[in-house]
Image: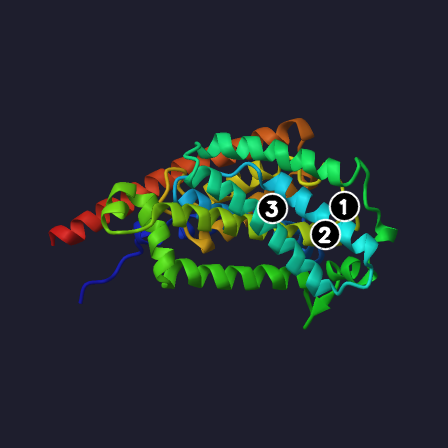
Amino acid sequence: MEKKSFDIKKLTSSREMSLVLILIVLSLFIQLRNSSFLSITNINDLITNAVMLSILAVGMMFVLLIGGIDISIGSTIAFSGMAVALILRSNPGIPTILSFILGIIIGTLCGLLVGLIIAKGKVIPIIATLGLMNIFRGATYLIADNQWVAAYQLPEGLKAFATGKFLGINNMIIVAIVVYIIFAYFIKYTRTGRKIYAVGSNVDAAKVSGINIDRIKILVYSIMGGLSGLVSILWISKYASAQGDAATGIEMDVIAACVIGGVSLNGGKGTVLGVILGTVTLGILNNALPLINISPFWQDAIKGLVIIAAIIINTITQRTMDRNNLKRREI
């Protein structure tokens, strides 16, 4: 009987597995430099801090899958959070669950506007979202009269949500897990999910097959907006305030998490699992670089190098997968 040998190519034949290996090596390296890195307390802090980024990354994955981009999400978070915070300031008796519903509705409307401008107005995504980024941010300052909503003006129930637990698990982590399950199922097992992949893989073929391209574009940007609205409430719960400059620049980290997780900027490729792993990788870097005494001036440069390395690894892995698929077809 022929003895089976260990095949590293099989082990690294998927983007997700390659990223898992990188995470293991990275974690071991950091642990050797600082023994507190893998402590339960630090891991809990790392995961909790990465929750909002991971939720946004799931939404961004949908946008990138169709070959789009959305750099207005930080402003959507600020606007949705401020709008809900102002409502809560005037009506402190509103239940926490209703706060989340309001945030999701406002965020979805913002995303719907983005989708309509891109799909019906035929505006390039980067231009449309750049313009709306400034509009939403300006609107945030206008509705708040350039002021903050402070902690004492927010309901105690909402402020307690971010630190509360259910079955011993932080509430924010539970929200993230629910989001992962819903959207992992949606993108993989529903007809609409397959249409999203089809649009990103080949838009012309998708048109020929009868897929309504505009409807898909509006849908994915609405999803992105809705998840931004969800995060806006988590944001004001965690930081116990609503500010006009909230989440400024967060879209760059979100896009980076997607790229590290194997989502193609050209569309058509990406998974929720990959996005989660990409977010964890970025979260580890944000958490660990200060722990091992890396200068703040070098931290952004190191994250940039990791992103470039991830793109190279994803490209090599994808080529390997394509070659393997081609060989199977020939056989």
Q: Quadrant of the C terminus?
A: bottom left
Which one is closest to the eye, mark 3 or mark 1?
A: 1
Foreground pick, 3 / 187 = 187
* Mark whose residue sits in front, 2 or 3: 2
- Considering every residue shown, the one lying at the far right of the view is 152
Give whichever of 136, 289 is nearer the camera: 136
Instruction: Answer above or below: position of 168 versus 82.
Output: below
Check the image and name the residue furthest to the bottom: 167
Depth-wise, is mark 1 or mark 2 nearer the camera?
2
Residue 141: image x %, image y %? 74, 36
- Which numbered marker is on residue 84? 2
Q: Which residue is mark 3?
A: 283
Q: Secondary structure at mark 3?
A: helix
Residue 200 numbered tag: none
Report the Cα–Cα distance between label 2 and label 3: 28 Å
CA gap, disc 3 to disc 1?
24 Å
Picture quadrant of residue 39: bottom right
User: What SS does tag 1 mark?
Assistant: loop
Pick whichever of labels 2 and 3 is earlier in the sequence: 2
From what the image shows, is residue 178 above or below residue 123? below
Asked which quadrant contains residue 47, the reply is bottom right
Q: In this rendered view, identify the residue nearer to me: 230 or 208.
A: 208
Amino acid carrying label 3: it is: Gly
